[in-house]
Image (cartoon, rainbow, N blue to C red):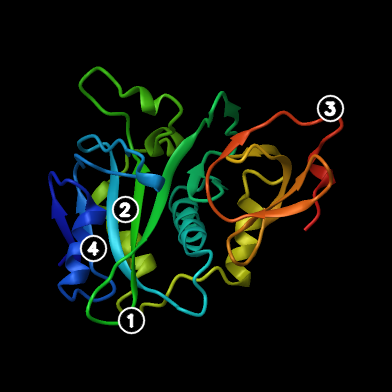
Amino acid sequence: MSRIEFHPRLGSTQDRIRELARAGAPPGTAVRAGMQEAGRGRAGRPWVSEPDSGLWLSLLLPMDPEAPGGITLAVGVRLALLLEARFGRPLRIRWPNDLHLPDSTGVDEGWTGKLGGILCESAPGPGPRQIAVGIGVNVRRPGGGATDPRLARAAFLEEWAGVPVDVDSLGEAVVEMLAPPEGITPPVLDRPLLEELHARDLLRGRWVRTQTGERGLALGIETDGALRIRTDDGREVQVVSGSLLPADGPPSSTAHEVTR
């Protein structure tokens, strides 16, 4: 029997899972929707969730108060490993929360090849602290003609994998991976996961611009989930939140300039 509460149509799986948390639902509780009418990503941005076109899922996981940083990236790495093992092709992770194809490039104010994203939010309830983990994966292009312009830079799992994808089976596999019945643990960016993240870091060695206007070379991600960059004036700073834009670097800049 499935452990996932399924809704053909729902406002937001995140809203529903947090509602369940307030009612006392335990870790491992999961909600999936065939479509979302008000799906969202980071900073409240709308997430396109057309009918039967993707995996729109949220689940409750315990939170480790001793290791609050890097939760989103820890989930992202584990999701990437699952998809790679299932479909036999590599993925990249773009700080702070997106899965991309290996050949993703910066265009205008975005990045091409976005396959999915992760949104982690607190989930207050009567018991120990939990976190609501929202996962969105574009599985196939929406049918019915017109395509939402926000999907112009998106990638789709079936096109990447080259095979049909059973969303029900994929959802079950994701829940099993993150919340196995034999023992659910908090998502923590430990050393093994950090090494896997470094191997898939899309931004490392690229020039980026922060929301505050600083331009720098991305050097890598730390254990607390912060992105380290080297600015134009040689300073090394940590970016802990916000979004990044692609930026042009000096002609001499290459990935070999990056050090961990």
Question: Up-down: is 40 above or below 26?
Answer: above
Q: Is label 4 in a helix, a strand or a loop? A: helix
Q: Which residue is mark 4?
A: 18
- Camera-near label (1 vs 3) is 3
Dot 1 or dot 2: first in sequence order is 2
Dot 4 or dot 3: first in sequence order is 4
Where residue 125 is drawn, which disc sits there?
A: none
Dot 1 or dot 4: first in sequence order is 4
Alpha-carbon span between mark 3 and mark 2: 43 Å
Alpha-carbon span between mark 1 and mark 3: 53 Å
- Camera-near label (2 vs 4) is 4
Q: Are marks 3 and 2 in contact (CB under 8 Å)?
A: no
Q: Amino acid at mark 1?
A: Glu
Q: Amino acid at mark 2?
A: Leu
Question: Up-down: is 217 above or below 175?
Answer: above
Dot 1 or dot 3: first in sequence order is 1
Where residue 251 is drawn, which disc sits there?
A: 3
Residue at the (24%, 74%) spot, across then down: 125
Is 158 left, or right, of 29 in this rendering?
right
- Camera-near label (1 vs 4) is 4
Residue at the (12%, 45%) spot, across then down: 8
Alpha-carbon span between mark 1 and mark 4: 23 Å
Q: Is label 1 in a helix, a strand or a loop? A: loop
Dot 2 or dot 4: first in sequence order is 4
Alpha-carbon span between mark 4 and mark 3: 48 Å
Q: Quadrant of residue 196?
A: bottom right
Is 189 left, or right, of 2 in this rendering?
right
Crowd class of label 3 (few under 14; some 14 to 19; many from 20; radius 10 Å): few
Q: Is label 3 in a helix, a strand or a loop? A: loop
Q: Which residue is mark 1?
A: 182
Q: Which residue is mark 2?
A: 170
Q: Quadrant of residue 227?
A: bottom right
